[in-house]
Image (cartoon, rainbow, N blue to C red):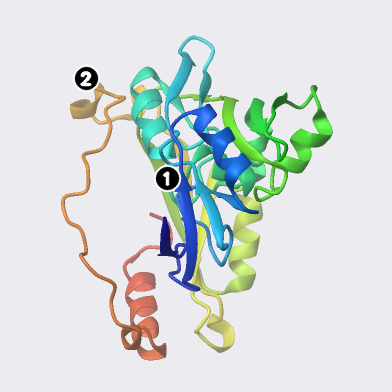
Amino acid sequence: MKRFIANWGNYPVVESDERFFSYEDQLQQLVKDSKPFIPRGNGRCYGDASLADATITTTKFDKVLSFDTVNGIFQCQSGLTLDKVLEVIVPKGWFLPVTPGTKFITIGGAIGSDVHGKNHHVDGCFSNHVTEMEILLADGSFTVCSPTVQPDLFEATCGGMGLTGMITKVTFRLKKIETSYIRQKQVKAKNLEEIIRLFEEYKHYTYSVAWIDCLKKGDQFGRSILILGEHATKDELPEKFKNDPLQLPKGKQINFPFNLPSWVLNSFTVKMFNFLYYGKNFKRDK
Protein backbone atom coordinates (compact mmCIF):
# COMPACT_ATOMS: atom_id res chain seq x y z
CA MET A 1 0.00 0.00 0.00
CA LYS A 2 1.44 3.36 -1.01
CA ARG A 3 1.47 6.01 1.67
CA PHE A 4 3.61 8.85 2.96
CA ILE A 5 5.92 7.92 5.81
CA ALA A 6 8.37 9.80 8.02
CA ASN A 7 10.37 9.21 11.16
CA TRP A 8 10.33 10.90 14.56
CA GLY A 9 11.31 14.34 13.30
CA ASN A 10 8.65 14.29 10.56
CA TYR A 11 11.31 15.18 7.99
CA PRO A 12 11.82 14.09 5.30
CA VAL A 13 8.44 12.71 4.26
CA VAL A 14 8.57 10.14 1.44
CA GLU A 15 6.03 8.10 -0.46
CA SER A 16 6.63 4.40 0.08
CA ASP A 17 5.05 1.14 -1.00
CA GLU A 18 4.67 -0.19 2.55
CA ARG A 19 3.91 -3.85 3.18
CA PHE A 20 3.05 -5.68 6.42
CA PHE A 21 3.15 -9.32 7.50
CA SER A 22 1.99 -11.38 10.49
CA TYR A 23 3.52 -14.77 9.65
CA GLU A 24 6.87 -15.94 8.36
CA ASP A 25 5.44 -17.52 5.20
CA GLN A 26 3.81 -14.17 4.36
CA LEU A 27 7.19 -12.49 4.80
CA GLN A 28 8.90 -15.01 2.52
CA GLN A 29 6.30 -14.34 -0.16
CA LEU A 30 6.72 -10.57 0.22
CA VAL A 31 10.47 -10.88 -0.18
CA LYS A 32 9.98 -13.07 -3.26
CA ASP A 33 7.47 -10.68 -4.87
CA SER A 34 8.88 -7.32 -3.83
CA LYS A 35 11.32 -5.05 -5.55
CA PRO A 36 14.34 -4.00 -3.43
CA PHE A 37 13.12 -2.85 0.00
CA ILE A 38 14.33 -1.85 3.46
CA PRO A 39 12.98 -3.42 6.69
CA ARG A 40 11.17 -0.91 8.90
CA GLY A 41 10.12 -0.90 12.54
CA ASN A 42 7.98 1.71 14.29
CA GLY A 43 9.58 4.78 12.68
CA ARG A 44 10.96 6.31 15.88
CA CYS A 45 14.52 6.78 14.65
CA TYR A 46 16.07 10.13 13.76
CA GLY A 47 16.75 11.36 10.24
CA ASP A 48 15.95 9.34 7.13
CA ALA A 49 16.64 5.77 8.29
CA SER A 50 14.31 3.14 6.76
CA LEU A 51 12.70 5.61 4.35
CA ALA A 52 12.64 4.09 0.87
CA ASP A 53 10.46 3.54 -2.20
CA ALA A 54 9.56 0.10 -0.80
CA THR A 55 9.44 -0.92 2.87
CA ILE A 56 8.35 -4.01 4.76
CA THR A 57 7.18 -3.06 8.25
CA THR A 58 7.41 -5.50 11.18
CA THR A 59 4.90 -3.98 13.62
CA LYS A 60 2.28 -6.72 13.04
CA PHE A 61 4.90 -9.41 13.71
CA ASP A 62 4.86 -8.77 17.45
CA LYS A 63 4.33 -11.91 19.54
CA VAL A 64 6.08 -12.91 22.77
CA LEU A 65 7.52 -16.38 22.15
CA SER A 66 8.97 -17.31 25.54
CA PHE A 67 9.95 -15.76 28.87
CA ASP A 68 12.22 -17.52 31.37
CA THR A 69 11.18 -15.67 34.54
CA VAL A 70 13.84 -17.44 36.63
CA ASN A 71 16.89 -16.60 34.52
CA GLY A 72 15.59 -13.50 32.74
CA ILE A 73 15.75 -14.75 29.14
CA PHE A 74 13.17 -13.27 26.77
CA GLN A 75 12.33 -14.32 23.19
CA CYS A 76 9.99 -12.46 20.87
CA GLN A 77 9.25 -11.55 17.29
CA SER A 78 11.11 -8.54 15.96
CA GLY A 79 8.10 -6.21 15.63
CA LEU A 80 7.32 -6.17 19.36
CA THR A 81 7.89 -2.71 20.85
CA LEU A 82 9.75 -2.06 24.09
CA ASP A 83 6.67 -0.73 25.89
CA LYS A 84 4.93 -4.06 25.34
CA VAL A 85 7.99 -5.94 26.58
CA LEU A 86 8.00 -3.82 29.74
CA GLU A 87 4.34 -4.63 30.40
CA VAL A 88 5.27 -8.32 30.51
CA ILE A 89 8.62 -8.30 32.30
CA VAL A 90 8.40 -5.56 34.96
CA PRO A 91 5.63 -7.23 37.05
CA LYS A 92 7.88 -10.32 37.13
CA GLY A 93 10.86 -8.38 38.47
CA TRP A 94 12.84 -7.82 35.28
CA PHE A 95 13.83 -4.79 33.20
CA LEU A 96 15.29 -4.09 29.78
CA PRO A 97 19.10 -4.38 29.71
CA VAL A 98 19.37 -1.15 27.71
CA THR A 99 16.71 1.55 27.56
CA PRO A 100 16.92 4.21 24.83
CA GLY A 101 15.18 7.58 24.85
CA THR A 102 11.85 6.11 23.71
CA LYS A 103 10.10 2.85 24.56
CA PHE A 104 8.13 2.92 21.30
CA ILE A 105 10.76 1.22 19.14
CA THR A 106 10.72 -2.38 17.96
CA ILE A 107 13.15 -5.03 19.12
CA GLY A 108 14.34 -5.46 15.54
CA GLY A 109 14.88 -1.72 15.24
CA ALA A 110 16.80 -1.69 18.51
CA ILE A 111 19.24 -4.21 17.03
CA GLY A 112 19.34 -2.73 13.51
CA SER A 113 20.24 0.66 15.00
CA ASP A 114 22.15 -0.97 17.88
CA VAL A 115 20.62 1.52 20.27
CA HIS A 116 22.35 2.71 23.40
CA GLY A 117 20.78 3.88 26.64
CA LYS A 118 21.53 6.10 29.58
CA ASN A 119 23.52 3.15 30.97
CA HIS A 120 25.79 2.85 27.92
CA HIS A 121 28.97 3.44 29.94
CA VAL A 122 28.05 0.51 32.20
CA ASP A 123 26.08 -2.01 30.12
CA GLY A 124 26.94 -1.19 26.50
CA CYS A 125 24.48 -1.30 23.59
CA PHE A 126 21.38 -3.44 23.14
CA SER A 127 23.26 -5.97 21.01
CA ASN A 128 25.58 -6.77 23.92
CA HIS A 129 22.64 -8.57 25.56
CA VAL A 130 21.31 -10.46 22.52
CA THR A 131 22.07 -14.17 22.75
CA GLU A 132 20.55 -15.28 19.43
CA MET A 133 18.48 -14.02 16.51
CA GLU A 134 16.85 -15.39 13.39
CA ILE A 135 17.30 -13.50 10.12
CA LEU A 136 15.56 -13.83 6.75
CA LEU A 137 18.21 -13.43 4.09
CA ALA A 138 17.77 -11.90 0.65
CA ASP A 139 17.41 -15.35 -0.97
CA GLY A 140 14.33 -16.07 1.16
CA SER A 141 16.00 -18.50 3.56
CA PHE A 142 16.08 -18.23 7.34
CA THR A 143 19.28 -18.52 9.34
CA VAL A 144 20.20 -18.24 13.01
CA CYS A 145 23.19 -16.30 14.30
CA SER A 146 24.65 -15.37 17.67
CA PRO A 147 27.94 -14.14 19.14
CA THR A 148 29.26 -17.70 18.64
CA VAL A 149 27.23 -19.01 15.66
CA GLN A 150 27.89 -17.10 12.41
CA PRO A 151 29.42 -14.27 14.48
CA ASP A 152 30.30 -12.20 11.38
CA LEU A 153 26.64 -12.07 10.33
CA PHE A 154 25.61 -11.33 13.91
CA GLU A 155 28.06 -8.42 14.25
CA ALA A 156 27.16 -7.01 10.83
CA THR A 157 23.44 -7.12 11.65
CA CYS A 158 23.87 -5.28 14.97
CA GLY A 159 23.91 -1.70 13.74
CA GLY A 160 23.50 -2.88 10.14
CA MET A 161 20.32 -0.82 9.59
CA GLY A 162 18.52 -3.74 7.92
CA LEU A 163 21.08 -4.24 5.17
CA THR A 164 22.00 -7.85 6.07
CA GLY A 165 18.44 -9.17 6.09
CA MET A 166 15.17 -9.03 7.98
CA ILE A 167 15.46 -9.78 11.71
CA THR A 168 12.51 -12.03 12.62
CA LYS A 169 13.11 -13.51 16.10
CA VAL A 170 15.32 -12.32 18.95
CA THR A 171 16.44 -13.81 22.27
CA PHE A 172 18.03 -11.49 24.83
CA ARG A 173 18.96 -11.23 28.51
CA LEU A 174 17.09 -9.02 30.99
CA LYS A 175 18.15 -7.07 34.09
CA LYS A 176 16.86 -8.14 37.53
CA ILE A 177 15.02 -5.46 39.57
CA GLU A 178 13.30 -5.34 42.97
CA THR A 179 10.92 -2.47 42.14
CA SER A 180 9.62 -0.55 39.16
CA TYR A 181 10.97 2.72 40.59
CA ILE A 182 14.13 4.73 39.94
CA ARG A 183 16.03 6.56 42.68
CA GLN A 184 17.04 9.82 40.99
CA LYS A 185 19.62 12.49 41.72
CA GLN A 186 20.03 15.79 39.84
CA VAL A 187 23.10 18.04 39.92
CA LYS A 188 23.30 21.51 38.38
CA ALA A 189 26.43 22.45 36.45
CA LYS A 190 27.32 26.07 35.68
CA ASN A 191 28.93 25.34 32.29
CA LEU A 192 30.11 22.67 29.86
CA GLU A 193 33.44 22.16 31.61
CA GLU A 194 31.71 21.38 34.89
CA ILE A 195 29.19 18.95 33.39
CA ILE A 196 32.01 16.94 31.80
CA ARG A 197 33.75 16.79 35.18
CA LEU A 198 30.48 15.71 36.84
CA PHE A 199 29.98 12.87 34.36
CA GLU A 200 33.38 11.55 35.38
CA GLU A 201 32.68 12.07 39.08
CA TYR A 202 29.37 10.17 38.92
CA LYS A 203 30.36 7.48 36.41
CA HIS A 204 29.58 4.80 39.02
CA TYR A 205 25.85 5.50 38.57
CA THR A 206 24.06 3.03 36.28
CA TYR A 207 22.06 5.70 34.44
CA SER A 208 23.28 9.19 33.60
CA VAL A 209 22.16 11.84 31.13
CA ALA A 210 22.46 15.62 30.96
CA TRP A 211 20.16 18.37 29.78
CA ILE A 212 22.48 21.03 28.30
CA ASP A 213 21.74 24.66 27.41
CA CYS A 214 23.65 25.34 24.19
CA LEU A 215 22.28 28.86 23.70
CA LYS A 216 23.85 30.46 26.75
CA LYS A 217 27.02 32.44 26.01
CA GLY A 218 30.25 33.20 27.86
CA ASP A 219 31.13 31.50 31.12
CA GLN A 220 27.65 29.93 31.29
CA PHE A 221 27.85 28.20 27.89
CA GLY A 222 26.69 24.62 28.30
CA ARG A 223 25.11 25.09 31.71
CA SER A 224 23.47 21.80 32.50
CA ILE A 225 21.50 19.53 34.76
CA LEU A 226 23.00 16.09 35.25
CA ILE A 227 20.31 13.47 35.86
CA LEU A 228 21.41 10.23 37.53
CA GLY A 229 19.44 7.10 38.33
CA GLU A 230 19.57 3.71 40.02
CA HIS A 231 16.91 1.03 40.29
CA ALA A 232 15.35 1.52 43.71
CA THR A 233 15.33 -1.38 46.14
CA LYS A 234 12.19 -2.28 48.08
CA ASP A 235 13.73 -0.93 51.30
CA GLU A 236 14.16 2.50 49.68
CA LEU A 237 10.49 2.89 48.76
CA PRO A 238 8.00 4.94 50.77
CA GLU A 239 5.64 2.74 52.76
CA LYS A 240 2.69 3.41 50.44
CA PHE A 241 4.53 1.74 47.52
CA LYS A 242 5.95 -1.29 49.34
CA ASN A 243 2.79 -3.42 49.00
CA ASP A 244 3.14 -3.42 45.21
CA PRO A 245 6.77 -2.50 44.42
CA LEU A 246 6.59 -3.74 40.81
CA GLN A 247 3.46 -1.87 39.77
CA LEU A 248 3.49 -0.29 36.34
CA PRO A 249 2.81 3.44 35.96
CA LYS A 250 -0.62 4.49 34.82
CA GLY A 251 -1.07 5.24 31.14
CA LYS A 252 -0.87 8.79 29.85
CA GLN A 253 -4.02 10.70 30.70
CA ILE A 254 -3.47 13.70 28.40
CA ASN A 255 -2.41 13.61 24.76
CA PHE A 256 -1.40 16.62 22.68
CA PRO A 257 -3.59 16.19 19.57
CA PHE A 258 -1.45 18.03 17.02
CA ASN A 259 2.05 19.31 16.27
CA LEU A 260 2.74 22.94 17.10
CA PRO A 261 3.44 25.19 14.08
CA SER A 262 7.12 25.67 13.22
CA TRP A 263 7.13 29.37 14.13
CA VAL A 264 6.60 28.45 17.81
CA LEU A 265 10.14 27.05 17.91
CA ASN A 266 12.56 29.98 17.71
CA SER A 267 15.57 31.31 19.62
CA PHE A 268 13.41 33.39 21.97
CA THR A 269 11.05 30.56 22.99
CA VAL A 270 13.92 28.07 23.35
CA LYS A 271 15.91 30.54 25.51
CA MET A 272 12.83 31.09 27.66
CA PHE A 273 12.32 27.34 28.06
CA ASN A 274 16.00 26.87 28.93
CA PHE A 275 15.82 29.64 31.53
CA LEU A 276 12.78 28.07 33.21
CA TYR A 277 14.11 24.51 33.01
CA TYR A 278 17.49 25.38 34.50
CA GLY A 279 15.87 27.57 37.14
CA LYS A 280 13.44 24.91 38.35
CA ASN A 281 16.27 23.32 40.37
CA PHE A 282 16.71 25.86 43.17
CA LYS A 283 19.44 23.77 44.80
CA ARG A 284 22.60 22.46 43.17
CA ASP A 285 21.79 18.90 44.31
CA LYS A 286 18.28 17.48 44.18
Q: Which residue is depicted at the point 65% across and 47% down?
A: 162
Residue 167 showing in the rendered view:
yes
Which image quarter is the N terminus in?
bottom left
User: Which residue in the structure is indicated by mark 1?
Assistant: 103
For the residue marked with disc 2, what is the amino acid? Asn
Give percent across and percent down for residue 151. 81, 30
| Quadrant into which the C terminus falls | bottom left
The disc, 1 or 2, on the residue closer to the chain's N-terminal end is 1
Between 90 and 77, which is closer to the camera in this rendering?
Answer: 77
With respect to residue 274, does 96 lie above or below? above
**Name of the residue lying farthest toward the front:** 33
Mark closer to the observer (1, 2): 1
- Which label sits on residue 220? none
Q: Are there few (<14), some (14-19), or many (20+) residues within 10 Å of tag 2?
A: few
- What is the x, y in percent for residue 212? 51, 70
- Which residue extends farthest top? 70
The amino acid type of the residue labelled 1 equals Lys
In front: 61, or 19? 19
Q: 4 above or below 143?
A: below
- Of residues 188 and 256, the one drawn nearer to the viewer in this rendering: 256
Secondary structure category for the residue under label 1: loop
Q: Can residue 225 be spotted in the picture?
A: no
Check disc 2 and report its element: helix, strand or loop: loop
Q: Quadrant of residue 122?
A: top right
Disc number placed over residue 243 in the picture, else none:
2
Instruction: Report the front residue among 195 and 255.
Output: 255
